[in-house]
Image (cartoon, rainbow, N blue to C red):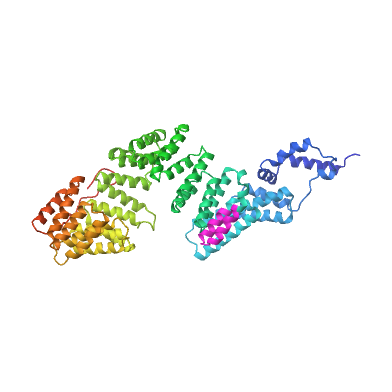
Amino acid sequence: MPISLRACDQSTRQRRRLHSLSPRQFLRIAIASGVLFSAVPALAQEPATEPATQNDLIPKSFDGEEDFEEASRLRLKVDSLDTLKELIGLAESAIKKGLDAADMEAAKKLVASSYIQKTELMIGMLNGSQQLSRARVEKLLKEFVTDLEQAIEYDPKLVDAYLIKTELHARRTEKDLAFETANSGVEALLPDSKQSDPESKEKLSRLIMMRAGLRTNPAEQLDDLKLSIQTNPSNVASITLYRANAMQQSKAAEAIEFLKSMVEQHPENELLACSTAELMAITPESIPDAIKLLTDKLSAMPNSVEMLKSRAKIYSVNKEADLAKADMDKVVELASADIEGLLLRAQVLLDDEKLDEARRDVDAAYDLDNNRVGTILLRAAIASAQKRFGDAISDYQLILKSTPKGQEKNPRLLMQLALLYSQDNRPTQAIKIFDQVIKTNQDYWEAYRLRGDTRLGLGDHENAIKDFESALELAPEAEQDRSGILNNLSWVLSTTPNDALRDGKRALEYAIEACKLTDYKAPHILSTLAAAHAEVGEFDQAVEWSQKGVELARETNAAQLEQLENELKSYQEKKPWREKTETKENKAPIGLGNTGVDS
């Protein structure tokens, strides 16, 4: 029977569909990742048992094809938010009207990914805007959440949707919803994760880590962090958090065993080896094993910069400066532009008091990147060790000027700067900074103590006593530095020339407590005890304790030996000690930057 013209036309259209792919067909093929093509040989080898009819050769038409075709075409040229919204509308319309199974799957994935793209675009616009009201921002955040819920409904395997939605809920302090989203994502994606591509595994690992952070049970947090590492052994954040949490929960031994097992499963993973060794090195008796682990790994990968750096850190902790420097020399040789390597070697050299060499490495690191706070802090430490206090002060000022708004009152940075001013004989400026710290941190006992020391050096005994009393009231009972506060308070109460301020009875109480805290082994504190005994007229005891202080100072070659000997002579002559120092203010210009110009 002759074939009709209609049949010929249909056959021609079928060939055109096979050889001239439309945008939606490209999309289907991309989503299927080659599955459609791989099925062709199987069909050729296993023909149907019954001959194909004319209707089998004619593709069935679906009402949604036209909308899907247009949506697929738009997908290739998305250039605005409006285009994206139009694409989503067309694809959803196609789904509602009906498509064949393959097109339906492709359309759902297209809608889901487009909702993600829309949300990311809108979040970027929101973050870049300073004009929106809080109500408008809240409305937009709700819209983002709704879009992401739609994305998950269309494609429950889209990890990006869970990640962004979890972050949005967390941003809105909706912790329960954030956990629910992360948990749903993990449950949906984890079963098939072994077959996932590396990028998907990396994202799933992040999602599991986020779930860990939303848990309240510490043991469950650790389990999630372990799972995150197992999913992606290169997740630096998960490994870091796992180590910290394990230490906090006193489960370091368990963490070491887990990380060791991960190292065995992934012998090529340098990060795991480094993390395991550094965790082991926290316990002194495990340091040799930690070094052996890295040494064994380095025998197979001798040019591993990360493992060399890690071993150098452990050598440094173990006071093996020469071995640490040898590793860091090799790191710098292998990667001369490795800033961390230069800074690690500089720290090793600083600890070994090779200050000029340390300074050269820091300068090299600074030349590579002059915005790293760590580089500038280390440069300041080296300058301070070289007594170039002006340069160190300039570096701290530079850090504080570049600190983000809201963090410029960082008390630790301010305290370090104040100490540098004190070391550079600029007590007035130091006191101003201590005042600033105390104004914003009224319970900061260290600031009271150090301001008291500075005032004592200026001869302002009345205010120094007040500061020491405040510090003593706020300092923790078990704090070792408490002995320093007690010592200085006792000293000024015993030795001030101001009769109205001296109080020998209180001074003796504080001195005895300070001696107990230091097991009567600190020469300068024994000196204070002697001064307190002298103030209450107990010169025999004053001579006894002063003599012990002098003997200890001689044994340790203490810098204050001459001072202690003079005090002993005074007590032998039945004279109490009186002291009032007045620091001369350094008014020379402060050195600029790291030029070497100093005050």
Across and down, in percent, residue 267 comes to 51, 37
Q: Residue at x 66, y 48 (%)?
A: 73
Viewer-side residue, 549 vs 3: 549
Give coordinates of residue 540: x percent, y percent.
Answer: 12, 58
> Residue most toward the right?
1
Give, as a single range, the part of the protein colored magenta: 162-186
Assess whether residue 175 is covered by the magenta stretch. Answer: yes
Q: Is residue 26 left or right of residue 544?
A: right
Q: Position of residue 138 (x, y in %)?
A: 53, 63
Residue 537 falls in which quadrant of the image?
Answer: bottom left
Q: Nearer the viewer, residue 277 or 351?
A: 277
* Dominant SS in magenta: helix
Percent x, y of residue 350: 31, 41
User: Is 300 in the magenta?
Assistant: no
Q: Is residue 155 left or right of residue 340?
A: right
Q: Nearer the viewer, residue 63 or 255?
A: 255
Q: Residue furthest left?
A: 573
